[in-house]
Structure formats: structure tokens, C-alpha cells
Image (cartoon, rainbow, N blue to C red):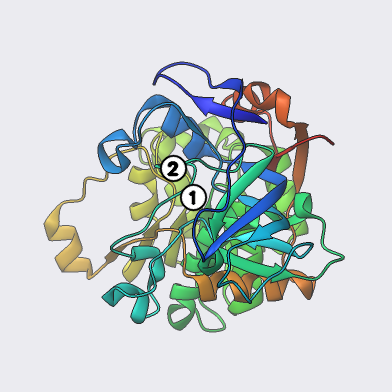
Amino acid sequence: MKAVRVHRYGEDASIDDVPEPEITGPWDVLVKVGAAGVCRTDLHVLEGQWDAIQRPELPYILGHENAGWVLETGSAVTSVQPGDTVIMHPVVTCGFCAACRAGEDSHCEASSFPGLNADGGMAELLKTSARAVVKLDSSVAPADVAALADAGLTAYHAARKAVPLLPPGSEAVVIGAGGLGHIGVQSLKALTGAHITVVDTSDAALALAKELGADATVNPNDLHPAARAVGGPPADAVVLAVLDITCGGAHVVFDFVGEHGTEITGPAMVRNRGSYYAIGYGGTLALPTIDLISREISVVGNLVGTYQDLVELMTLSSQGEIALHTTSYDLLDAVQALHDLDAGKLTGRAVLVPNP
């Protein structure tokens, strides 16, 4: 079968012919991939950022946002059967460790992470576990939902955690309205009563955010030079603009970028006793401890989400509350899709479709 594999860090992935995976255990599920999401994490994988954490054996298949149809199951699987439409939780978990038993299965002590430390779904077939599959209605097209498996799940997980902090009348700021952020806006709209301000340098992304329910938008590139001079460099002007819109700062800032300076401006947009939620990554967060203490602000990390989060997200999707905006590529055009993502040419998400 055809598969997108990483051979060496710092280089493009390649399209390889590889053996098809086979059922080997009672809880295995073999899925015919209908679509695999293209994620910024894939770019970080190719850069080698995840090597120290996941230590995958190269080469291996990329792809951690996957949906498709069950092809075959192991002898113990009863939750799905061949022909079922499914989406896969990105983490394959054991079910027995303390984290799994507490419902925090994304922190499973014995997990594997297809696409990061094991073969993923940028291929024609994917072998996963019954614990990872969520059955969907047969009318659902995998290409319409695949990226919800990680991008959607991560955005929803962050919004879900912040619900107690965002009652009606509160202020939420979303930095980055791209692949994750546009789902974050919809999740916040569905779950909270917050006034939502979105910051992005793309007019197309901001227009999409407004369409999806954002109440206000800020494009740093549009700030008048005179406004930029207030307080110093352009970054300060962005912060001042957000502080003005939010009447003193956000109760929660959701940073879906986490690099290129947003890890500096994001915390500055938080009001006293507010929270900075880090979701995107790549930069380095540096905060004076006196600011943390004197302002009583919180910094919160957000990793993927639980199986239950994914079930809830797919329920909202089926109700029309959350929808993906995607660009489809043939699986064989995966390298181009990754380049387009890296170049900022995509609005929403990209998905790879085998044999379209």
C-alpha cells in the first residue's frame, strides 16, 4: 500500500510502498483510511522536535488525525464491525493504568501514538485498537471529520476545561484562527457565554472566525503606525488593542499558535486572576514569577483530549454546532500539502484522501 513516511529529520516525507498492516491481537481494528488530517505537529515531527519525547524508530508512517471504515477486527472486538464508519482517537491506550481508570486516557502510562511513535494513518490502511475507535453514522464522510480527531479534539479539550472560567459576560481571546483556532471558536461558542475576540494575521482566517461566531477580530498587520507607537513596538500595540476590546484583558487567552511571539503577547492579554491556555507550541514561555504571583494568573497546558472529549465533540458535530473547513489533497500529494501548511496557504485544515 502507499504510505507517507518520515525517514530523516530535516527532510521532506516520502511516498513509499509498504506492506499492509494485519490483525495480530484480539483488540485490533484494521481501518480503511478515508481521510487523514495534515497537522502542524507533522511539521514539528519532520523537524525532529518530537524525537526526544517519542523516540520513534525511523522510518515510520505519519498521520494522527484519521477517519475511515472498519475493514477487519480482532476476535474480542464487539463495539464495531466491518463496514462501520469510524474516527480514531489519536492515542491508543491500555485501559488499565491509573490515568485510564480516571478517564484521563490521553495520559495513559502505556500508550502508543500512531503518527508520532508508531505507524499512523497517512496511508491506505491503519491498524488501531478498539479502545481508540468512535463509531459514526454511516452518512458521515471521513474527509469531513478526520481532522477533528486531533485538531478538533485538542481545541475542544481546551475550551471544555475553561467552561467554569467563562460564564456569560466573560472575555475569551483566541490567538490563531487556523486549523485549531477555527474549531476553538466554535467550541467556545457552543460551550460558553464568553465574548470572543480573535487575533490573526490572515484576513481570510479572521473572516472565517467572524462567520463562525467571533464577536471581534484583530489583525496586527492592520494596526495604524501611530497606534503601534503607543507603548513601543507592534507587539505592544496588539496587546493594547485587545485590552481595549476586552475592557482590561481576557479571563482566558487561548493561544493556538504558541510561537513566533504569541507566547509573549498572549500572557500580556490576560487580566488579573485570568488564565493563559497554551495549545500551540514551538516557542518558549518566559514569565517573571512576580507577575504570576502579584496578578494571580495561571498558565495551563493542553494536550489532545480524552476519549470522552472526542465523543462529545462528535456529538456537537452531528448537531451542526462544529464543522471543519478543509482543503482535500490526494494522498500522493502529501508533501505539497505539508509545504502549503508550512507556507500559511491554508485556511482551516488540509486532509489527505487515499484513492479519491
Quadrant in which the C terminus appears: top right
Vertical placement of residue 64 versus 316, above or below: above
Estimate how packed mark 2 is, as few (under 14), some (14 to 19) or many (20 or more) residues with alpha carbons within 10 Å: many
Which tag is nearer the camera, tag 1 or tag 2?
2
- The residue pinned by badge 1 equals 256
Q: Which amino acid type is shown beneath numbered disc 1? A: Phe
Estimate how packed mark 1 is, as few (under 14), some (14 to 19) or many (20 or more) residues with alpha carbons within 10 Å: many
The residue that appears at 51% across and 53% down in the rendered structure is: 24
Apparent side of residue 250 relative to residue 288 in the rendered image (left or right): right
Of the image marks 1 and 2, the number of the one nearer the N terminus: 2
Q: Which mark is residue 118?
A: 2
The residue that appears at 65% across and 71% down in the rendered structure is: 189
- Between 32 and 245, the residue placed more toward the observer is 32
Task: Identify the secondary structure beneath mark 2.
Answer: loop
x and y percent of residue 155 in the render? 54, 60
Vertical placement of residue 106 versus 311, above or below: above
Quadrant in which the N terminus appears: top right
Q: Quadrant of residue 58?
A: top left
